[in-house]
Amino acid sequence: MRDTPYGGNALGMVVKEVDFPPGFGLHTGNIGIKDHTNDVMILAAPPGTVAAGVFTKSRFSGPSVTLSRAHLEDGRARAVVILSKNANVATGEVGDANAREVAELTASVLGCATDEVVVASTGVIGVQYPMDRIRRYMGRLATEGISAFEQPGSATSAATAIMTTDTHAKVSIARAGSARVVGIAKGVGMIEPDMATMLAVIATDAAVEPSALDTIFRRVVDRTFNALSIDTDTSTSDMAVVLCSQTAGPAEESAFEAALHQVCLDLTRQLAADGEGAETLIVVTVFQARDDALAKRVAKFIVNSPLVKTAVHGRDPNWGRVAMAIGKCYDQDILPERITIRFGPDEVYPAPATKDRLARLERYLESPEVHIRVGLGIPGEKSDSYGTGSFTAYGCDLTDGYVRINADYTT
Amino acid sequence: MRDTPYGGNALGMVVKEVDFPPGFGLHTGNIGIKDHTNDVMILAAPPGTVAAGVFTKSRFSGPSVTLSRAHLEDGRARAVVILSKNANVATGEVGDANAREVAELTASVLGCATDEVVVASTGVIGVQYPMDRIRRYMGRLATEGISAFEQPGSATSAATAIMTTDTHAKVSIARAGSARVVGIAKGVGMIEPDMATMLAVIATDAAVEPSALDTIFRRVVDRTFNALSIDTDTSTSDMAVVLCSQTAGPAEESAFEAALHQVCLDLTRQLAADGEGAETLIVVTVFQARDDALAKRVAKFIVNSPLVKTAVHGRDPNWGRVAMAIGKCYDQDILPERITIRFGPDEVYPAPATKDRLARLERYLESPEVHIRVGLGIPGEKSDSYGTGSFTAYGCDLTDGYVRINADYTT
């Protein structure tokens, strides 16, 4: 990120040491899947933990996604195991069997049932896991038992172990009454979650019923991880999981949802700001829309437009490109004469440009976070009112760095 | 383009001097809209010329699009005037009046009706035309009259006059019996035509009825200009117009359509290869699909994926990214186990990689044109057959050059 030290992010925050809530155990280590950096993370949850997950809709999704979706159907889980540096995608029947075996090995380490284990995996596509190494490693872990697990586990260590091309660990914490909500996430490219998400794990000691948790989590994900787009590419491995250990006692539902929303939104902003090659976090808010769905479509067109992304990168107050991106939404309610466009505090359309404002705009575009606000001006049901639909999307600028990272990253 | 001289393109072709068919007059010149390069082109067609056009569906389209669509409704036209370096988009009622005045001024130069003039314009958004200069220029042209027009006009000069950030002129010619079909086009960025197209003008002396012309042109555009995507951004100014002067007498309809298709496809490939910053033309063919629409969706996902585009740029045989892009098409008929992926002549999925093949692939990816072929393997109606839907999409790699051009291009 521009002008921020390693370990910081576009929001100027420094990554803190954050622990998972009491009762969660953590193991991180190196299996040697690709190199000598950590590539395995196991988060163990206490008995009685309630869980929910959302997954990629990709038709090329891997066996981790299929398996974990099935294992979360009963709304219960005891562990999440994440292998990084290999996605185990497009690996055929051997890949399916390997994903099942990873769940079995983890279950035997923890003494839980295989269907209580959630498996996630990201990295290269089309290559088999090094199963010999994984078996040897898990065998050793089973021998060491509980001593191989930190308690309380460091969420920062966990977030570091699941990184691929991320430049720093992404963690977030919030409180809901006496309960804590702690989240970790990874992902910098191949990110446009679509009713699903990249890799994120949220652990909380709040007590929430399975059905309520699922509803709340989907609502939160829709406004956070699903509002994120780094490069319009949807991963084959996206997954977000929330684990509620219930040990802190019942949480007031709206307080819990607010805390969960805060953690997921914070992680979303960290992911956007750490997009591959990114130097600027772009936040696009569309309001005065007929409904939220229309606002989301327009916001996504803007945040995904390579011409908007490069204009922000070039600190160019080129609002014409935002107009172009709005125009891509072929909806009869979108009329140029109703629309207003703001960059930060300043209206740029239809207000005519003044020298003062252009100078202010150029200064504004130097900041590490750029807000674009679009009022669609669609009339509401009452006279003199506007439609109440709105949506905020999160993305980043398109830089030479993105091209270099992805042109040079080898299979 | 890589390893090709200025004036050439990715297909290794050198731009030839091509003339418009007899009967068409051409004027090109400099009004001074932005700088001293040519920025006006008027193509005059003889009386009785039949015409058809397709236009951008952008909700932020400019008055040139609205006006020209209305003027082509009767299937007749006498002139196309194209102003470059200014799009006249998002310019309000003043912009509307200016577009009408450009048509009126052109009509008075040529002595035709205003509604026989097609107006097109590309360049910066949100800035008014310099109308004083345009009026002075057109006044002078009216005095000079026919002497200001070349006949036969050079299509190469015309294509040069409409360039913005294009690196070379795009022209193409084909024959249908005794008739000639000559096309010009421009456009390097903000290109994903959607049932419309970028700027293209095709002039022919073939005799074709207005209603047949419209049907044929739409069919051709769907498989050529609409199969093109440089950066997923849809211009506010896209327009493709065909003018048939009728002077070469009736053309056999299928021969005419074949010639028109050849010219439009050639221009499409030239546009893709000259995409902003592009070094490689990417051609994606999807076949064995349920229908053409599904094949088109999948082909567009692949050709638009920034990760596929950067992999091609980095000469990386990373077929996993093609699998990822296919996965973005959430269609129940798409199953990984049915799919085959080829890079050039070589199957890369599901066939396992061999050392020989990897070496061959790396050599193949050095070429200035990369073909990706995806068989969806969806069963057809008869047993042992596959679906007959197919589509070919045209795009280019994503390079540091694209970022630099669009980050540095100022309003």
Image (tube, coloured by chain):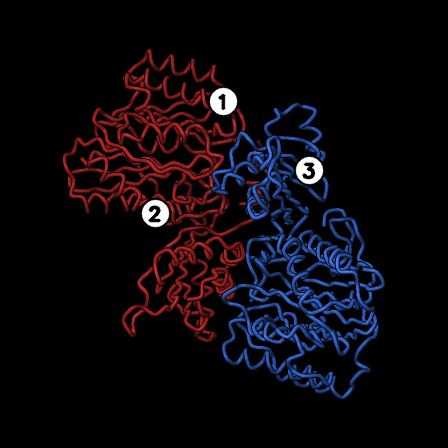
Chain colours: A red, B blue
Q: Quick check: do tags 2 and 3 share a chain?
A: no
Q: Give the quarter of the image for residue B7.
A: bottom right
Q: Amino acid at mark 1?
A: Glu
Q: Which residue is mark 3?
A: B365
Location of residue B400 in the rendering, given as x and y in whole percent from the top left corner: 60, 49
- Looking at the image, residue B227 lies above or below residue A153: below
A206 with respect to A135 (left or right)? left
A22 with respect to A134 (left or right)? left
The chain that hosts pointer 1 is A
The residue lying at 68 percent from left, 75 percent from top is B76
Q: Amino acid at mark 2?
A: Asp
Inter-mark Cα distance, 2 to 3: 39 Å
Give the foreground label among 2 and 3.
Answer: 2
A140 with respect to A127 (left or right)? left
Inter-mark Cα distance, 2 to 1: 32 Å
The chain that hosts pointer 3 is B
Mark 1 burial class by Cα count in 10 Å: few <14, some 14-19, many 20+: few
The residue lying at 51 percent from left, 23 percent from top is A128
Pick the residue in front: B230 or A335.
A335
Pick the residue in front: A187 or B198.
B198
User: Secondary structure beneath disc 3?
Assistant: loop
- Looking at the image, residue B268 lies above or below residue B339: below
User: Secondary structure beneath disc 1?
Assistant: helix
Mark 3 burial class by Cα count in 10 Å: few <14, some 14-19, many 20+: many
Q: Which residue is mark 2?
A: A222
Q: Which residue is mark 1?
A: A93
Question: Which of the numbered marks, if any, corresponds to residue B177?
Answer: none
The residue lying at 75 percent from left, 57 percent from top is B254
